[in-house]
Structure formats: C-alpha cells, structure tokens
Amino acid sequence: MASSLDTLCGQAFGARQYHLLGIYKQRAILVLTLVSVVVAVLWAYTGQILLLFGQDPEIAMGAGSYIRWMIPSLFAYGLLQCYVRFLQTQNIVLPVMVSAGVTALSHVLVCWLLVYRLGLGNKGAALANGISYLANVSILAIYIRVSPSCRSTWTGLSKEAFHGILSFVKLALPSALMICFISIHDPLRSWGSHKHPCFKRAWCWAT
C-alpha cells in the first residue's frame, strides 16, 4: 500500500509543494499501521487457520509460532517502505542504499546472536528481521531529521495527516492489489511456460 506514495509524493514534488511529502508520509504511516494491526491478528492465529484447512498439526504449529515472531517485522517493514518512497521521490537514493547495506551486513550478526548465541532457533531468525527493519528505519529517520536535503519536505508532525485518509486508501488499495496480482501472475506464467507447452500457448493468448 505504500506504493501509492510513489504517485502522491511524486506529484507533490513535481508541483513544488514540498511540505505535502511529509504529510503524505505521515498519512501512509498511519494507514499502514492500522492495516498491520489487522494483519497481525491474522498472523497470530495462523496455526489455527492452517489446522482448519487440514494442514499437518506439527507443520501448522511450527508455522504459527514462526509467523507470530514475525509480527514486529510487519510494522517495521511498513514504516521502512514509507521512508524509502519518501526519499526516492526526491531523488535521494544514496542514503537508502547505505542504510540498506549497513543493515544487511549487521543482519548476519543479529541472526547469529539470536539463533545460535541465545538459542532462539527459527524464532530468533524471525525476530532478527524485525530488528534489521527497525534499524534501517532508524537510520533513515535520523537522516531525514538532520539532512538539509529534507528540510523543505519534512516540517514535522502535522494534523493534516489525519485528513484525506479515505482518499489515500482508495489509491493505496488498488496499488496493493496490483502488486499482489503481479506476484501471482509471474510465477504462474513461468511455471506454465516450463512445464506445459499447451498451457504456455493458452497463457500467451490470454495475456
């Protein structure tokens, strides 16, 4: 859903309405946090949901335990996407690249500490994702706060972020669905082209 910022922030930046970028970012953070709460509830009951669909109990409980420990990364990832798109629409990409590189390198250490040193196993691997995402967000947040490049686009918290939420959702929801359909479409096309020649011809004709 954060992909809607590409459109909104891009338009505002092109129109030189720089203060709107910060407002759009805050609005996106608010909406994504609320959506993440709903998704987190579903993730919390993943094990039970898998059991309802006839999954093996051991696999269902293992998957449910892992995904529950992934819940912190869900919220951190939503924040990260808002920060990344806020900067990218301003053609600020170097800090994004550096922060991603630093957190990717430190992620190895974090995984080792949680998985092996503390003995958390796959739970530690899930938690490490949230820690790395949060570290990435923290680096970008500090950059936005202190960098002169963002002085005109980030002017602090604003009540305007609470306005126009419905309009934001109307743009964000189709964007999210489009990405979901693309992620389903490409594997299906790849599978069909490699496994079934007849399916390949039918798929090419349909698309």
Image (tube, grey):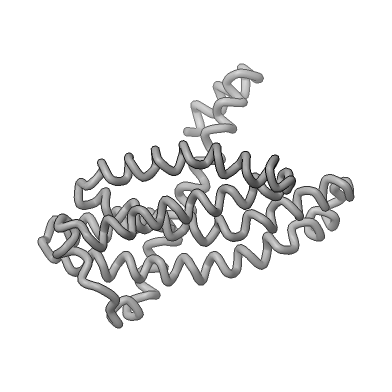
Residue at the location (62% across, 44% down)?
113
Does residue 76 sit above or below 96 in this rendering?
below
Q: Nearer the viewer, residue 82 or 119?
A: 119
Quadrant of the image containing the N terminus: bottom left
Spot the residue most to the front: 117
In the picture, measured across the screen, residue 153 lies left or right of residue 181, that is left
Residue extending farthest to the left is: 16
Q: Outermost residue toward the bottom?
A: 159
Seen at 57% across and 44% down, the residue is 110
Residue 126 screen position, x and y as percent: 64, 49
Percent of width and height locating residue 143: 27, 55
Q: Is residue 162 above or below residue 188?
A: below
In the rendered image, the vertical position of residue 167 relative to residue 105, given as above or below: below
Which of 14 and 19 lies nearest the eye of the viewer?
19
Q: Is 41 on the left-hand or right-hand side of 57? A: left
Residue located 22% across and 55% down the image: 10
Where does the image place residue 145, in percent across and percent down from the top left?
A: 25, 63
**Residue 84 in picture, x, y percent from top left:** 34, 51
Q: Quadrant of residue 115?
A: top right
